[in-house]
Amino acid sequence: MDELLREVVLPRLGNRWLDDLGDAALLPRPAGEIAFTTDGFVVQPLFFPGGDIGRLAVCGTVNDLAVMGADPLWLSLGMVLEEGLLIETLARILDSAAAAAAEAGVAVVTGDTKVVAKGQADGLYLTTAGIGALRADRPRGVQEIRPGDALLLSGTVADHGLSVMLQRTPGVASALESDVAPLGGLVRALLEAVTGDVLFLRDPTRGGLAGVAADLAARTGLRLTLFEPAIPVRREVRYAADLLGLDPLSVANEGKVVAVVRPDAANRALAALRAHPFGRAASLAGRFGAERDGLCELETFSGGRRIVSKPYGEDLPRIC
């Protein structure tokens, strides 16, 4: 274990907090309140087009902090390694995690490593926790949403879930890549552009856009209408979804954000999102109505309407 830490982990993730290898990281206290989150990652395969479990673990955790209105600061990283995992594989994953942490502006300051018998961990499981400093301009909360408020989407949907699924589908080749990315910079740009007018943020991971939208309608008690022509879906995603019998709206994303803003701030918010590399395909994808039935509807390409429900069960196992 000493050799693994010295030769594989610290050269990639080392910093002034982690290098001491103490039982806990001693960190400076942020001013004001903090946000704290934790998540586990068990994706199969470990590597997929556009990313891997290391990048996914870092991005998934910093994104959970960012959409709460927190600037991510520090991460922990716990590794469960299966006996027989190649050191080269672990090194590649840690290189990816380190690159994602640098991109997100966070440090991995503590962690843990366990080795289990062959067949017990599908190669590698990761668990992360993150701490971020809450911003003064953080989202105001679901309770502030009113009729007329706009739902914005930062880009295309279903890229991550379907890219992972296609990797597991024998005989299928695709150019589709995961959207996994750290969203802290995108969220900061949005909050600063429309300070006080951002009501809600969420990264639509498991359950996708459908899960977030249906949950918002139920929590606010308002009718939420999504506009199908305004929801960007890549052509290859539509083909893959049809092949697998899936609805792109319910498939996981790992590099997108859903935002609810005041009506008069929608254009400024869209401009801020589109000016960022991760938000160039941002759109006004929905709007809250005055009807108080808690339903989410999709206004389709043909002008019809259908109910959007929170996905039941899990269509796509092991995509994060």
Image: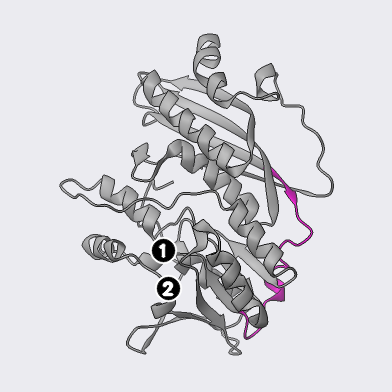
Q: Is residue 245 magenta?
A: no
Instruction: Name which quarter of the figure residue 111 lies in.
Output: top right
Residue furthest out toward the left? 171
Query: Sequence-wise, which precedes: disc 1 or disc 2?
Result: 1
In what element is the residue under mark 1? loop
Q: Which residue is label 2 attached to?
A: 231
Relative image position of residue 273 (x, y in whole percent):
56, 65
Relative image position of residue 247 (x, y in whole percent):
34, 67
Instruction: Name which quarter of the figure residue 156 lies in.
Output: bottom left
Residue furthest out toward the top? 3
Residue depicted at 54% across the width and 48% down the height:
182
Q: Does the magenta stretch include residue 135?
A: yes
Q: Tell me the magenta residue range.
A: 131-149
Residue depicted at 54% across the width and 61% down the height:
257
Pointer 1 local density, CA inside 10 Å: few below 14, some 14–19, many at least 20: many
In what element is the residue under mark 2? loop
Marks 1 and 2: CB-CB under 8 Å? yes
Any mark on residue 157, and which?
Answer: 1
